């Protein structure tokens, strides 16, 4: 197709601002699918995506649209993931486009990820079409939100659309704006092939299906290809586009978006951001921006039944086929048995993997407290990385510890500035910047403010998000990005149940927080571990020093009930016999720690 008639664009928005719903209306408006063929959120194929209202995997669809000028246009819509954990995937999607529709909820206004996505789109020099969504709702405040858009983002009212993804209001105007305002793709059909991979999935018959945008040259079925970052060579078994199902074609030309079936057996061999080129006449340089996926959060996953370990291993292998960013390796816990230490892009990614393992594979699992990767320099100069708190060396062998920090951006009504600042101070955050959004109105409490902080990623792993929502009554939004490693003072906090170390509860904390964190942990475990026939001590320790303790009282049994006669010596004998039995039971007794204990610890405030 003529390049001047191609438009490649994506939709960027904060979570739950109506991105997938708008995609449905665009599909309907171009006649790509009939109404009876459609389901809600066509671009979200996973149940988890529909339930949570977020996009986890990037999708693409080719729309055919005849504009008011009478020309037939090819519109390639790429649906981006909608959470900060997948920010790299979003950046690769933006790199595959020339324009973006910026969707802003007319009831909520600009949120943290709205700003993050706009800045990322600007870095890629995309033409941005701002649009206020949910105009059909009675709670919509278009004037207030438009004031924020013009003040913070600099867009005029006459270039901002007002639409409703639910009713279809303004969708025809949006299609015309996409044709008029987004430039056609640049690239040379005569140049050596260069195509950008922005996502992939595994097909049992065709191998890895790579989603890509052709920047230069073209791809035909049967072409000998290779990846420029990994060096993997393969043949294009099939070439096609998404409509939304896979539609095979003979060729993908410059500027087009589609897929190739590679025959590869592992999605990690075709990573997001890599460049596809010809194996016979390769390009001189790859497309910029590629970097391998780096897990930021680590946790142990164990089956609740030891015999399910083989099933868990098989499930992890199958899940890995479609999720190259998931990493795992076997590990063994004295209490939990055999399991896996897994690496995730973030807490949402961890939650998704955990739910998919339980739902799709029917497994009952235990997840340990999440941790981050620490860089530990030993006294002898050796440098090691620690992702499992149980592997942290003794303090006497450690010269310094470095931990990852993130830069966070919080947008909240100005009435909650105080509680947000208190929360950040409690978690060791460092204030960077405060900015008021929009012009001040009569009621300054309703004016919204953006707070930028630096804080340890470790502090975000337990109850940070819940605490933020609680202190701002649900009005705050959050975005963050990795900043780098900083040296800090940390110690390992261990938990002992009945004098047995439970490494799944171990965590890394600052020394000054060890007592409070240990007290919170032992008190939470006291609530969820069932009582035994003997007293069960629960202790939190730093090295050999106990910093907190709680005891689970023994179950009471009336051994004197059958003592219906005789003097006091008979009763004393029975009580002494019971005492000896409890001591023996405590010495050989095994405390069963229920699954709920591990889940509750994940939500324990430190």
Image (cartoon, rainbow, N blue to C red):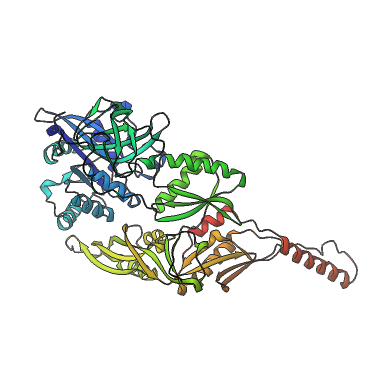
Q: Is residue 548 above or below residue 317?
A: below
- Answer with left or right where residue 16 lies relative to residue 513: left
Q: Position of residue 580 (x, y in %)?
A: 79, 67
Instruction: Residue at 88% x, 69% y: name it.
Output: 570
Q: Is residue 300 left or right of residue 205?
A: right
- The one nearer the camera, 177 or 294, is 294
The x, y position of residue 202, in whole percent, is 39, 35
Q: Is residue 214 above or below residue 537?
A: above
Is 473 rendered above or below residue 289?
Answer: below
The quarter of the rendered structure image containing the N terminus is: top left
State left or right for residue 180 relative to residue 328. Answer: left
Please state which of residues 534 and 442 is positioned toward the viewer in this rendering: 534
- Which image quadrant for residue 274? top left
Give the residue at x 43% y 39%: 321
Q: Where's residue 422, x and y in %? A: 36, 70
Q: Nearer the viewer, residue 425 or 194?
A: 194
């Amino acid at each position: 197709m003529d390049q001047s008639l191609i438009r490649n664009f994506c939709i960027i928005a904060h979570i739950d601002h109506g991105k997938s719903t708008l995609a449905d209306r665009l599909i309907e408006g171009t006649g790509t699918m009939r109404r009876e063929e459609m389901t809600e959120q066509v671009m979200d194929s996973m149940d988890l995506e529909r339930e949570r209202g977020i996009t986890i995997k990037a999708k693409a669809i080719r729309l055919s649209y005849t504009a008011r000028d009478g020309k037939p246009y090819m519109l390639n819509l790429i649906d981006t993931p909608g959470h900060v954990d997948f920010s790299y995937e979003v950046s690769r999607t933006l790199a595959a486009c020339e324009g973006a529709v910026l969707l802003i909820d007319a009831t909520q206004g600009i949120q943290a990820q709205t700003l993050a996505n706009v800045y990322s789109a600007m870095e890629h020099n995309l033409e941005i079409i701002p649009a206020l969504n949910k105009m059909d709702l009675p709670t919509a405040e278009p004037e207030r939100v438009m004031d924020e858009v013009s003040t913070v983002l600099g867009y005029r009212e006459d270039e901002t659309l007002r639409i409703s993804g639910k009713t279809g209001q303004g969708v025809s105007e949006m299609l015309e704006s996409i044709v008029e305002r987004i430039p056609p793709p640049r690239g040379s059909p005569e140049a050596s092939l260069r195509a950008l991979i922005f996502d992939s999935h595994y097909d049992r018959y065709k191998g890895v299906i790579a989603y890509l945008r052709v920047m230069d040259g073209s791809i035909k079925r049967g072409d000998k290809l290779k990846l420029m970052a990994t060096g993997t060579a393969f043949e294009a078994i099939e070439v096609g586009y998404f409509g939304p199902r896979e539609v095979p074609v003979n060729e993908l030309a410059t500027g087009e978006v589609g897929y190739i079936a590679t025959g590869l057996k592992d999605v990690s061999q075709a990573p997001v951001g890599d460049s596809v080129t010809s194996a016979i006449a390769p390009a001189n340089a790859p497309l910029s921006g590629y970097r391998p996926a780096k897990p930021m959060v680590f946790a142990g996953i164990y089956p609740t039944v030891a015999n399910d370990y083989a099933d868990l291993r098989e499930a992890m292998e199958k899940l890995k086929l479609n999720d190259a960013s998931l990493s795992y390796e076997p590990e063994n816990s004295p209490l939990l048995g055999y399991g896996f230490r897994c690496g995730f892009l973030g807490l949402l990614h961890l939650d998704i993997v955990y739910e998919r393992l339980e739902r799709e594979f029917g497994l009952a699992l235990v997840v340990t407290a999440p941790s981050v990767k620490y860089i530990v320099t030993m006294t002898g100069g050796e440098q090691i990385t620690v992702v499992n708190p149980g592997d942290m060396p003794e303090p006497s062998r450690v010269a310094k510890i470095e931990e990852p920090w993130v830069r966070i951006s919080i947008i909240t009504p100005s009435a909650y500035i105080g509680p947000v600042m208190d929360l950040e101070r409690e978690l060791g955050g460092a204030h960077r910047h405060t900015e008021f959004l929009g012009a001040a109105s009569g009621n300054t409490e309703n004016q919204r403010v953006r707070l930028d902080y630096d804080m340890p990623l470790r502090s975000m792993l337990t109850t940070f998000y819940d605490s933020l929502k609680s202190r701002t009554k649900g009005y705050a939004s959050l975005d963050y990005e990795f900043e780098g490693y900083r040296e800090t003072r940390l110690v390992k906090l261990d938990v002992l149940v009945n004098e047995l170390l439970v490494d799944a509860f171990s965590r890394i904390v600052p020394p000054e927080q060890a007592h409070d964190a240990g007290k919170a942990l032992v008190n939470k475990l006291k609530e969820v571990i069932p009582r035994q026939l003997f007293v069960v001590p629960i202790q939190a320790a730093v090295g050999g020093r106990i910093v907190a303790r709680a005891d689970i009282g023994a179950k009471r049994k009336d051994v004197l009930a059958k003592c219906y006669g005789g003097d006091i010596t008979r009763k004393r004998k029975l009580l002494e016999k019971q005492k000896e039995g409890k001591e023996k039971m405590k010495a050989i007794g095994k405390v069963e720690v229920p699954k709920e204990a591990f889940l509750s610890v994940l939500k324990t405030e430190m």
